Image (cartoon, helix red, strand yellow):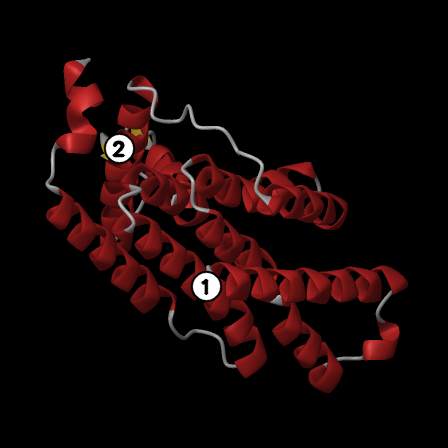
Amino acid sequence: MNFFKNFKNLLSESVTTLVIAVIAVYVLVTNFGGIDNLWLFLAAFVPLVLVLLAVLGLQMSKKSMAAHTVLLITLFLGAGRAFILAITSFDFGSFSFSANFTLELIINSVIFVYLALVVLSGLLTNEFKGGLGSSPVVMSALIAFLFFFFRDGFSGAVLKIFPPVIALMFGSPFYAIVLLLAGVADVPFRFIDVLFNGDILASPISYFLFTAFAFYLIYGAVKGLLSHKKE
């Protein structure tokens, strides 16, 4: 049990920062390209960059547990599922794994295990006991949650809002706003794509309502970031 409790302290702060930076570069490289449509590429890439900037910012602000948790939730939960499915695909009949252990799967699995152990270490040592405080960002997060709930459903809303909440719990409203912005940063690019490459008139009223509200959230997030920068 002590191994799990002390795992977060296994690496020095500088080495941990380097590890987070390497993971960020790896994520960028593996997610760069593959989409021919410029607007859809930006719709996928810009939110990713915002998440990674928030993670690096949290790490450099000495909020390592928040950085690891956000990275795990936003980018490596899927890798964890793939890892579990891979190691449980062993067939005793053929005495082999049915899963294809690609290099990407192995790297993602190693990163997932590392992040999961760090987060588990934080949970065992009560690092997640901070409150949300009374920051105006809390109300913005609640509004954003309602938006995501009506647009994406409950599970989608939870996955979108949990990273900003983690940042708030560790006293980082600025990076909470960055993560909130990441949740809607794809909307302008998707709107442009529909405008020029799709049939905008065939879109339902709900699309226009959600798009308009997403633009409002983006405006609020940018305004919040600028106000925090001045402080």
Near mark 1 (Cα within 10 A), the count class, few <14, some 14-19 or many ≥20, is: few
Foreground pick, 94 / 167:
167
Foreground pick, 220 / 29:
220
**Rendering coords of residue 20 (x, y %):** 24, 52
Q: Is residue 66 above or below residue 52?
A: above
Near mark 2 (Cα within 10 A), the count class, few <14, some 14-19 or many ≥20, is: many
Q: Is residue 106 above or below residue 2?
A: below
Q: Which mark is residue 229?
A: 1
Determine the image quadrant of residue 189: bottom right
Determine the image quadrant of residue 138: top right
- What residue is drawn where x is 12% and y is 33%? 10
Q: Is residue 10 left or right of residue 181?
A: left
Amino acid at circle 1: Lys
Q: Is residue 100 left or right of residue 149?
A: left
Q: Is residue 109 above or below residue 202?
A: above
Q: Residue furthest front?
A: 231
Q: Which residue is mark 2?
A: 118
Q: How many marks?
A: 2
Q: Is residue 108 above or below residue 98?
A: below
Q: Is residue 21 left or right of residue 150?
A: left
- What residue is drawn where x is 41% and y is 50%? 75
For mark 1, give the secondary structure. Answer: helix
Determine the image quadrant of residue 215: bottom right
Q: Which mark is residue 127?
A: none
- What residue is drawn where x is 75% and y is 65%? 211
**What quarter of the picture does the N terminus occupy?**
top left
Report if the CB atoms under discs 2 and 1 are less than 8 Å apart: no
Of callouts 2 and 1, which one flags the residue occurring earlier in the amino acid sequence?
2
